[in-house]
Image (cartoon, helix red, strand yellow):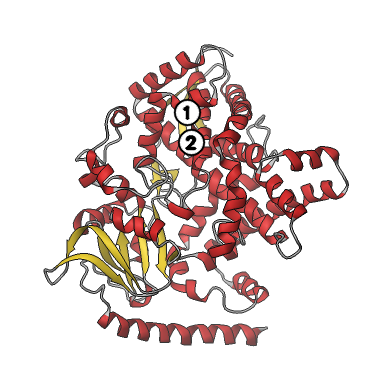
Amino acid sequence: MALNISFILGLGIVATLALVIRRVIQNQTSPLRNIPGPTSGSLLKGNVHQLMSPRNEEWKKELVETYGPVARLRGPFATIWLHVYDPKALYNIAIKNQDIWSKNTIGASGLLLGPGLLTTEGPQHRKQRKMLTPVFSAAYLRNVTTPFYETSYKLRDALRKVLGSEAKEVDVLKWTGRTALELLGQGALGYSFDPLVEDVTDPFAEAVKSFFGATNALGVARAIFGPFVLIGPAWLRRQIVELIPNANVQSLKKIVDTMYQRSTDIVNEKKAAMDKGDDAVLRQVSEGNDIMSILLRANMTASEKEKLSDDELIAQVSTFILAGMDTTSNATSRLLHLLAMNPDVQEKLRSEILDAQAGQEVSYDQVMDLPYLDAVTRETLRLYGPVGKLSRVARQDTVLPLHGPIRGTDGTLITELHVPKGTVAMLNLWACNTNKALWGEDAYEWKPERWLGPLPRALDEARIPGVYSNLMSFYGGGRGCIGFKYAQLELKVVLSVLLANFKFELTDKEIVWNHAGVAFPSVGKSRKPEMPLKVSAIGTL
């Protein structure tokens, strides 16, 4: 085995050197060399360490404000990357030529999550997406609104039990994470993760909550060694990971193993019940619209060749739990943090919710249409979307048109980019959502009221390609977030219950937001995901 590992590592070093030499030669004639951008003092890392740093907001904002909607970056091994938030370029990448621009992390992500919706490409991805789209229809969401309320009421009762008759400091992130996990289980998987009756820590929930922070800690290494992650058989790659004496690597391995095991258990439990002829399970599968029911129903009628493998079934569970839990729970926590910082907005929003409730559950249509709740939600997702950037790679030579011209380093105006095959584009979703040329000079300010009147005309003219309200928060096109309506409903239902029953205030602890794959809060210099707020009960049950 030692010989095999040494051979693989040696092969990797030779391939790396060859890659560096080829990239240096290519850059001398690259059509992108005329695009302005920041310098980098590292041949190995380029600007990657600056992009991946979770607390490097000044550099990232300077990148946006200095170089505009398109800039040249340095990737690993002297690669030329693009930094993009030009709306026409985003439309081209996300929609018009989405088959040319594929995800840049498919190989590495596939190893971590398996062949699920986030990591597959081409026909396999389109087949999976078509199969799963009914889960997130408006008709289905109307049906799950009541279960969403029931889970949110459990959260309310658990928090009241924790608080008693006094205001207390509560780690809000832990509770929003547990609630998001249970909402996903009940609404999307036909499975209960957490009854929300005790203040306990669940290893699976902790693993999901820590995933993006753990991957971000290895962000530079993943970018550098990404091309080599699929070298060799799976057992050898596993052995190499086992031997790496790095705490971040071992932590991520433990997180992935925990997620995989629970996802496997969920699939196996439902399959075993079906094999035993459990009438309740068979009826749930035949009538249900949750992810597992749809996938298992499809497998029951498909030919052997078309059936999804167990690996694909397990990967879908891991994918939807990861994509749905961390993003929504962190967005809920962000909104509660903002409301604690802006008590006047909190009071106004609470009044709207209480007026709408009038002692009864608010329907799907009502909760989705509450104007101030909608404005607060949209403004939070505009300025603080959980996912701030994505990467794509050009699989062939292509042309990228621009909404407005940029000036090259030689002084010429550039209206379109000739992009060579293999070019990585970092898509800055946050920068598009806060583009002052489109949103106005107050684009960096959190102002829910902006959604209560007409939006700037420039937004209509720019034709932002996002799936949600002139925003790129949920991306767009065939890889846009399939569950964005599900996430909105979850966010609004949980908020409506929490604000009707609790008041949220800041503590004396500094809450810092870390920009990993999904933004998460921590305290001070710590990187542990948590968000303490002072919570006090209001009203009566």
Q: Is residue 528 left or right of residue 84?
A: right
- The residue tagged 1 is 368
User: Vertically, is 128 above or below 36?
Assistant: above
**Mark whose residue sits in front, 2 or 1:** 1
Locate residue 98: give its quadrant. Answer: bottom left
Where disc 1 sits, the SS reads helix
Q: Quadrant of the C terminus?
A: top right
Locate residue 182: give its quadrant. Answer: top right
Q: Which badge, 2 or 1, comes first in the chain's sequence?
A: 1
Q: Is residue 366 left or right of residue 62?
A: right
Q: Residue at x 60, y 24 (%)?
A: 153
Q: Quadrant of the N terminus?
A: bottom right
- The residue tagged 2 is 488
Within-10-Å neighbours for mark 1: few <14, some 14–19, many 20+: some
In this view, the residue farthest toward the right is 276
Image coordinates of residue 532 in percent, x first then y, are 47, 34
